[in-house]
Each structure stands twice: as C-alpha cells, then as structure tokens.
Image: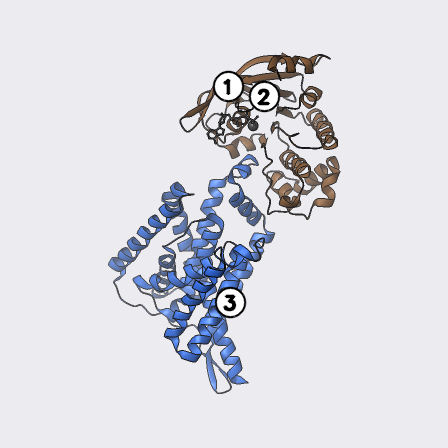
C-alpha cells in the first residue's frame, strides 16, 4: 500500500483551470521530487494536496483513505503538512511560538520542540525573536522545523532552497534525510535546485502546464543530468 | 484633597466606561476585521438578560457576570455561523449585515418585551470620601474595566487558545496546514467578542437602565474609540479610552456634559487626522 495515491487530479483557481492531469504515487518514508518550469502548477499541486484548494476531479487517497473532500486541518491531523513557498512564518509571533503552533497536535509539545532545536541548532539562539525579524534562511529553517514538530508522515515542501545560502541548504538536506529514515517521513519536494533534489530523491516527476508528464529515476550518477536534459533547463 | 480624589475617580470612570463599551467591538474588529454595528444591541441583550434573570429571582451578580456574557456569547456564535462566516473579507457587506441585525434586534426586543425602560437596582450603596459621596458601583466598574483589559492580555499572551487565535488571524491557511480548525477559531473569537459586549451591557445596566434602543448610545463612542485606537486590541483600546475619556470628562467638568460628548468626537477627529491608522497604527504597532 502506498502512502499517497493521486489519480486524474484536476484543480482550478475559480474558473481558471491550472491542474489538468495529475497522477502520482508516494510511498511511506520516500522522498519524491517534482520539477518543472515557473508557472507550471507545482505550488498549485502542493496546495491542492494540502486541501487549500478544492479539486474539481480525480482522487486523492492517503493510506487508501479518500481524503479528497477533507479540509486542510483534517488532512493535517492525518499526517499531511505543508511548508509553503515563501515560508509563511507568523511574523508577529516569536520563533518559540511558531514552533508551539507546529507542535499543536502533539502530546509531548516541549520535548518535540527541544528535539527540533537539537536538529536545527541555529534556532536555539533565536527562540525569543519575532519570526518576522529572521533572515530568509532562518525563516526557512523555522518553517521546516515548525512543520516537522507535528511528526507528519507526508511533508509537502515547496522550493525550500529559494534564496538560501549553501550551508543552510546542506543543513536542510541532512535533516530531511535523517528524519525521513528515523520517522518514516515521506516528502514531496518541489525544487529548482537540481543538486539538492538529486541528493535526496530517487524518483522525480516532471510537470508541465498542469500535467505530470514523466517519472524519472534519478538515483544513479547521471540523475542530475537527466533532469536537466528532460526539462531543457 | 478630597476633591482631587473625586475628580480623579470621575476621570477614571469616563475612561473605564469607554473601555467597557468598546472592548467587545475591539476584539471583533482587531482580530477579524469585522465591524459589528450590532455591538450596541449585543450590549442591550446583555442588559435584558440581567433584567429577566433578576425578575426570575436569580442573584444579580450571577446574572451580570455569568448569564449575560454566556447568553450573548452563544448568540454571537450563532450570528457568526449564520451571517458573518459568509462575508469575511468584505468589510462593507459585514457592516450592512450587522446593521440589519441591529435594526432587527431592536424591533424584535421591543415587540417581545415592550418599548419601555427597565431598571436594574445598583448592587452597592455610596462610599463617602470626605464630604463627597462616590457610588461604590463606580469603583467597581473601574475595576471591571481593568479586569477586561487584563484578562484579554493574559489570554492572548499566555494561553494556548490565545496563541492559536493570534496565529489564525495572521494566516488562517497556514494554521490549517498545522492542524488548526480555522473556522472554529473564527467562530469562537466572534463569540468571545460578543460575550464581552453582553457583559458590558449587563455591567452598565444599573446605571443606564435597559431599553430596546439603548445600543444607539453606545455604538458611537465605542466605534470612535476602536477606530482611534487602531488595530491592536489592548494597546489601542487602552490608549484611545485613556485619551478620549480624560479629554471629554475634563471638558464636561469645565463646560458641562454636552460639551464633553462633543469634545470626545472632536478629539477623535483631530487624532485621526494626525494618525489615520489610529494610535496603534503608528505607535506601538507590534503590541497586542
Ligand atoms: N491565486 C491564483 N489565482 C489565479 N491563478 C493563479 C493563482 N496562483 C497561481 N495561478 C496561476 O496558476 C499557474 C500555476 O501557478 P503555480 O504557482 O502553481 O506555479 P509554480 O509551478 O509553482 O511556479 P513557480 O515555479 O514560479 O513557483 C500559473 O499560471 C499562475 O499564474
Ligand atoms: Mg511555486
């Protein structure tokens, strides 16, 4: 049984259709990439999987359960969460409060927050700062830690390396790899940074004009080249 | 000396009065950007809850402090579910809808209970300071205003529910992705705002009396206090009430009560000319 199974998914903003034909499968604990040019519907895909956007046709099942009609918070309680493009940190709340919201549904809230801080040590000195007063890279780390607080089984991760310095990109890759293994976390990773995606994912879907076109196996040494060629980057 | 104390208490009374009548409106506006024109009628419903409970033999304190906020809070939840929920983000539409609600409530209550003034006995007698007598109930209301502000501050700053509410108002979509039911949060917030309106109406009932149209007297000053205060609930309500309350009350002392009211509006006009976003739109922008 796969963790997430999406068939024939369609979605639109009002009357403007954006996703036309989305088929994809994600197994538990697996990191899967989604790549495509700007404006092809990657963000829209993650938003409709989260439940922020009503889907007009197709099926979305999570552990064989149909979740298509569920609102976002119900999907979140089933283990899905999103780190949006642009991070959406709560700017008026402190870093610690942001993490508390992430750990909203857990029993051991403060233990889990401590665990996240040990994985992302640079958060330790920032806990009392307002989220809005963090740098872009720090916000990205915070958004990731906040999402992981709730022990998700499926993380929807939208362009986490956008405008982030290489050392933080490396920190994120290391953390994702290890949590994916230890906590059986699956990730759908939307990325433009091919090296980053190739270091994490074994399979990559390409998306073009709202249609999932190809599934690439990128685990070999030529993985990065394969993605670049296919997309014509 | 005695006279100074009495004057100080009178000033505080004016400030506390503004805090009491504007808190419910400020919560709903500050958190949800909804201007609840029916705010005065929510207060009126709080007043009637006290009148009816007192007639039924319920202890006046229980009627004021428990039943009134509970009844009006639940009514607020109903209003949010049936009307407000469909209009979020549409300021003019919510304004018109709550205006309609306000007219309906005045008419409805007048038909059911009659368009006559109902009195509520003040639960305290006077306290004498030197040769002046200050109603103990005034002191109580000043304490109640303090309790309003303190309880909202503590709830927003230190409780889990307050944290969730603040985050939801900032970004409802993001909290949903973290497992929070944002619609429930909106409904509850509106209910809490309504409960404060009902409580204020109940607390003021012994002074103002209770009549179906009483809300009209409150919505004006409450609205002006909230707009002058700006977007932050606590700092805004406190600073605007403090400023407007003392200006209008001092004017009332010197020139008579009519001038006091006029001065309140005039002071608000000048302030908004200088600070179009309200006091907390420019100053203390980051405070609660
Ligand atoms: N809120 C919206 N309303 C209407 N159309 C939108 C909205 N958001 C995105 N779109 C349109 O949907 C299409 C897909 O947008 P989307 O944001 O999903 O692209 P993307 O692949 O994430 O792009 P990028 O790589 O730039 O982030 C675009 O044509 C965009 O203009
Ligand atoms: Mg995008």
Label 1: which secondary element: loop
Tell me the CA gap for discs 3 and 1.
Answer: 58 Å
Q: Which residue is mark 2?
A: A3
Give A198 or B197, whichever is nearer the viewer.
A198
Q: In x, y percent, where is residue A173?
A: 71, 27
Give B28 or B155, whichever is nearer the viewer.
B28
Q: In x, y percent, where is residue B225?
A: 45, 61
Mark whose residue sits in front, 3 or 2: 3
Residue beneath the point at 33% across and 49% down: B96
| Image mark for residue A18 | none
| Image mark for residue B242 | 3
Q: In x, y percent, where is residue B205?
A: 38, 67
Q: Which residue is mark 1?
A: A209
Q: Is residue B139 visible?
A: no
Along the horizontal axis of the image, is A92 left or right of B264?
A: right
Which hue is chain B drawn in?
blue
Tell me the CA gap for discs 3 and 2.
Answer: 58 Å
- The picture quadrant where one finds residue A107 is top right
Looking at the rendering, in which quadrant would you find the N terminus of chain A?
top right
Tell me the CA gap for discs 2 and 1.
Answer: 25 Å
- The picture quadrant where one finds residue B179 is top right
Q: How many neighbours does mark 2 have within 10 angstroms: few (below 14), some (14-19), or many (20 or more)?
A: some
Specify the chain shown as brown: A
């Amino acid at each position: 049984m796969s963790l997430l199974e999406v068939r024939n998914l369609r979605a639109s903003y009002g009357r403007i259709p954006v996703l036309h034909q989305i088929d994809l499968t994600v197994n538990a604990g697996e990191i899967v990439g989604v790549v495509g040019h700007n404006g092809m519907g990657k963000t829209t895909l993650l938003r409709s999987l989260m439940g922020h956007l009503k889907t007009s046709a197709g099926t979305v099942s999570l552990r064989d359960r149909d979740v298509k009609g569920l609102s976002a918070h119900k999907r979140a309680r089933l283990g899905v969460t999103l780190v949006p493009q642009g991070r959406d940190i709560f700017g008026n709340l402190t870093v610690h409060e942001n993490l508390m919201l992430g750990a909203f549904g857990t029993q051991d809230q403060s233990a889990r927050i401590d665990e996240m801080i040990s994985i992302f040590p640079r958060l330790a000195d920032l806990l009392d700062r307002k989220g809005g007063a963090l740098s872009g890279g720090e916000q990205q780390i915070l958004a990731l830690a906040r999402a992981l607080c709730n022990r998700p089984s499926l993380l929807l991760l939208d362009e986490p390396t956008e405008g982030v310095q290489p050392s933080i990109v490396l920190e994120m890759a290391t953390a994702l790899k290890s949590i994916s293994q230890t906590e059986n976390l699956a990730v759908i990773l939307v990325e433009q940074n091919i090296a980053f995606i190739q270091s994490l994912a074994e399979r990559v879907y390409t998306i073009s004009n709202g249609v999932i076109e190809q599934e690439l196996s990128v685990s070999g040494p030529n993985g990065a080249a394969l993605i670049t060629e296919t997309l014509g980057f | 000396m005695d006279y100074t104390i009495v004057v100080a208490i009178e000033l505080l009374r004016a400030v506390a009065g503004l805090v009491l009548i504007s808190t419910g409106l400020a919560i709903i506006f500050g958190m949800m950007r909804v201007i609840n024109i029916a705010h005065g009628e929510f207060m009126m419903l709080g007043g009637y809850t006290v009148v009816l409970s007192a007639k039924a033999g319920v202890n006046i304190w229980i009627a004021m402090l428990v039943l009134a906020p509970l009844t009006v809070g639940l009514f607020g939840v109903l209003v949010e579910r049936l009307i407000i929920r469909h209009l979020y983000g549409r300021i003019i539409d919510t304004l018109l809808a709550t205006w309609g609600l306000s007219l309906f409530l005045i008419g409805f209550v007048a038909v059911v209970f009659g368009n006559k003034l109902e009195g509520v006995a003040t639960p305290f007698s006077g306290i004498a300071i030197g040769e002046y007598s200050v109603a103990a109930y005034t002191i109580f209301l000043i304490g109640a205003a303090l309790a309003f502000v303190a309880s909202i501050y503590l709830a927003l700053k230190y409780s889990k529910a307050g944290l969730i509410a603040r985050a939801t108002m900032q970004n409802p979509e993001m909290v949903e992705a973290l497992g929070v039911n944002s619609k429930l949060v909106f409904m509850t917030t509106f209910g809490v705002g309504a409960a404060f309106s009902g409580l204020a109406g109940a607390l003021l009932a012994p002074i103002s009396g209770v009549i179906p149209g009483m809300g009209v007297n409150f919505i004006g000053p409450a609205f002006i206090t909230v707009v002058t205060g700006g977007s932050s609930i606590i700092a805004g309500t406190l600073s605007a009430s403090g400023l407007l309350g003392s200006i209008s009350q001092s004017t009332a002392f010197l020139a008579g009560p009519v001038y006091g009211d006029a001065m309140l509006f005039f002071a608000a006009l000048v302030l908004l000319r200088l600070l179009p976003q309200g006091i907390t739109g420019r100053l203390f922008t980051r405070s609660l």
